Amino acid sequence: MVRWVWPSVWRPSAATDADAHDLARTRAEAVAANVTDKGGRIVLTENGSEALDEVAWMYADGRLIDGNVPPSLVGRVEELADSERSQTASVGDYLLYARKVPMDGHHVMVIARVDLTPYETSEQRSLTLSLILGGLTILLAGGVAHLVVRRALRVVHEMAALADDWGRHEPGRRFNLGVPRDEFGELGRTLDHLLERVDNALADERRLTDEIAHELRTPLTVLRAEAQLAQLSGEPVPTEAVLSEVDRLDTAITTLLRAARALTEKGTRCDLRSAAQQAIAGRAVEVAFPAKVEVAVSPEVAVSLLSPLLDNGLRHARSRVWITARNQGEAIVVDVLDDGPGFDPAEVDRVFEVGVTGGGGYGLGLPVVRRIAASAGVEVRAIADGRGHVEVTLPAARAAA
């Protein structure tokens, strides 16, 4: 059995394919309806159309009875005429449809031809039009997308410019867009967070300046007073007083530098008891520590935290200062205590701010303690319990693997 396929050069769509087959079938049926047997001879009862003769032909018992077959199609048409069933075939630009007409004692076939050129032209025009419309649609969609994206990016640029201007001149300004409902809300919230960080950084810078001035002003004032006193009395400046205040200046500067570097000192550890002994430096302070307590901060940071707290305790104690340590989960809590008047409950949350004093003068050195603690991930808080009491929570050092 021969299998007929469409040429690879052109494949009609399902709609045009069906139209061509319907037309060929209609022509064949129009001819078959007029086929009759007259005295054993097959004839057409009606066929006065010359146009139909060019597109439809009737064969009876292998002979052409009606129609004019083009020479280029004779071979293929005769093959179809000799076949035993109705079928469709294509030759070049033509569709051929062979229809078997049932006649007793005779083999009758009607073959109809349909020119596929108009269908091919229509298909090509449709394809061209589809391509043009598709291209226009793509251009239109691209233009709309460009406008939408351009508008969205304009909003982004405007928000970024505002945030940059606020960060320079008005760090307290915020977009305050509320709960994010879209990407612009998310952007606004992110920029608000960045502005908050800028504002905090500026405030931290101001606090650092205040702390430096606070820590350095006192020893400088003492040195100036000693020099003026010596100038008025005509006596030399007491060497011991000068050295003491110079040492105090050196300690303040070193402590501030350690506070600035505390963020870079990761993965360090130290023996808390040894650090406490360095902070005490021969002063009358009682120590109640376990035999060995290790914390996850450097020895310098631990000393810089404890030393100003012990100075405050010694300055305001009536007779006794002591320091204890205890385990609390994954942290070590150090309590620096004295039997002085303690902190004012109304000021207990502000004693680490520059210039704030309580309990008869607490405040000197405490802002620096807070800065070192914040940089090293340590918690420091004052407790108003009728005595001088500052609690320092340090991360416990993990056991070596």
Image (cartoon, grey):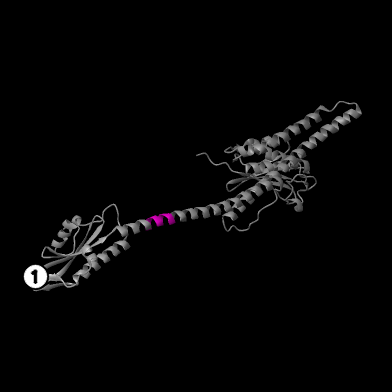
Q: Is 313 left or right of 7, judged from the image as shown?
A: right
Whether residue 315 can be seen here:
yes
**x then y, percent, for residue 44:** 16, 70
**x then y, percent, for residue 217:** 79, 37
Is residue 181 shown above or below 27? above
**Residue 132 is covered by the magenta coloring:** yes
Quadrant position of residue 179: bottom right
The residue sitting at 80% across, 29% down in the picture is: 242
Which residue has dot 1 on it? 105
Q: Quadrant of the N terminus?
A: bottom left
- Residue extent of the magenta highlight: 126-133
Amino acid type at circle 1 is Gly
- Seen from the viewer's position, the closer of residues 295 and 186 is 186
Q: Secondary structure at mark 1?
A: loop
Is residue 124 shown above or below 277? below
Q: Main secondary structure of the magenta part?
A: helix
Q: Is 226 left or right of 98, judged from the image as shown?
A: right
Q: Is 259 left or right of 27, judged from the image as shown?
A: right
**x then y, percent, for residue 106:** 10, 68
> Outermost residue toward the right?
233
Is residue 61 shown above or below 348? below
**x then y, percent, for residue 236:** 86, 25
- Seen from the viewer's position, the closer of residues 400 and 257 is 257
**Residue 328 is covered by the magenta coloring:** no
Neighbours of disc 1 within 10 Å: few (<14), some (14-19), many (20+): few
